[in-house]
Image: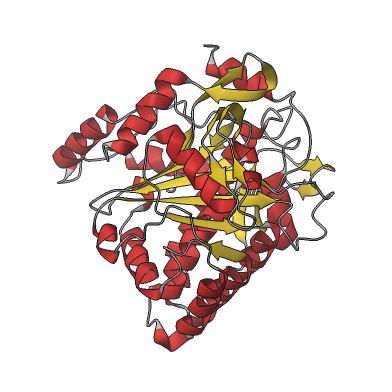
Amino acid sequence: MHDATRAVARHAVGRSRSIWGGIGRTLLVMVSVIAISSVSVAAYGVWHLTAKFKQNAVSLGDGSAPSIAALNGAFNVLLVGADNAPGQKHFGAARDATLNDVNILIHVSADHHRATVVSLPRDLVIAHPQCTDPKTGEVFAAMAAQPLNTAFARGGLGCVVGTVENLTGLTIPYAALFSFDGTVKMADAVGGVPICVNKAIDDPDSGLELKKGVTVVKGRQALAYLRSRHGVGDGSDLSRIASQQAYMSSLMRKMTSAGTLSDPTKLYGLASAAADSITLSESLASPDTMVQMALAVKSVGLDHMVFVQYPTAEDPQDTAKVVPSTALAAALIDRVQRDESIGLDKDALGLSTELEKQKSAKASSSTGSPSPSATSKAKSKSKSESDVLAGLRGQTAAQQTCSVAYGS
């Protein structure tokens, strides 16, 4: 198998077709679930909004309906971003088929204190199971090696879920689908998201223009940041994932520090934007399920919410695509299956960099007299180091990072 680092670099020369890259919506979906259920559900018109979700809900096609009790332990959710979604306008050229170009697997631990968010690349070449189109009844045969982002065209959201289950061996009872328009609406609903770049960026392909340093992005500027490939990193889809993870982390920090979850206006705005632009699985589109899931996700601390890229290597048949980096991918999924902690090493940021003020804060906290809890902290650090899975790319929600401009 080819070295994963070399695969990232060569993947940059792959096809340059535009996709939305809305991985940021992964978190927005979870945030919207929290928003609609975390405070006085009835008081903020949640039941009305939930009716919208239920009206548009889709079946995953497996004939099963998980019970509310399932959320008392570990659970998995798949968030899917659709390129060329039906009814979508003014977001690039139309395509013959809708593609699942963003695929995010979220695993919440049994104790609800940890979450692992795995980004699966759109061009990941893997086996696909047999799928049935829920609208037409057409049956699509299993395939040996095709890009992940072709799954939606073979059977909608249920087929994407089935394909990721086939890859990981995990059971995924909950899923959500969202489009370009959702990113614009929801970025506005939260009042914008602070992002950082190490140099000024002017990327005509995505329409992204940013000054050096921190900028609060909203609407289409947020979408442009999430879509930008030739403005960040090495120009690859994989480096774009790093920027998207920085966006998600920043969003989580804002949600927990700006009083959003206790502000009725912001909460209702988030919920309303979600209801208008997100399609949920039937298993997720119920008030009780939303409430239980919200309570679970709210228990996860920023330090224990880890965003990682699914490990890949260059596809020997096509340098524009990638395949699973067998050993590391297997190790990652094994940790998720066993509901174990996943730690990141010092090189995990890859082509992102930690914000300078956060580095300074860490340096300051490491000087002076030891605190009374120094011993317990040392033990905690030792345990954390034992959880590290070397070679993974990603960051925690607590880390403030800057995207590295293309060519830096």
> 199 and 24: which one is in front?
24
Q: From where the camera sits, is residue 89 visible?
A: yes
Residue 221 is situated, as x and y percent measured from the top left of the image, at 73, 56
Image side of residue 90 versus residue 243, left or right:
right
Q: From where the camera sits, is residue 245 visible?
A: no
Q: Is residue 168 above or below residue 317?
A: below
Q: Is residue 243 above or below residue 236?
A: below
Residue 75 is situated, as x and y percent measured from the top left of the image, at 33, 51
**Figure quadrant of the C terminus:** top right
Image side of residue 196 versus residue 235, left or right:
left
Image side of residue 101 versus residue 27, left or right:
right
Image point (47%, 78%), residue name: 263
Residue 154 is situated, as x and y percent measured from the top left of the image, at 62, 44
> 189 and 374: which one is in front?
189
Residue 384 is situated, as x and y percent measured from the top left of the image, at 27, 34
> 174 and 398: which one is in front?
174
Find the residue positioned furthest to the bottom: 43
Q: Is residue 189 above or below residue 17?
A: below
Numbered-mark total = 0
Image point (62%, 72%), residue name: 276
Q: Where is residue 407, by image quadrant?
A: top right
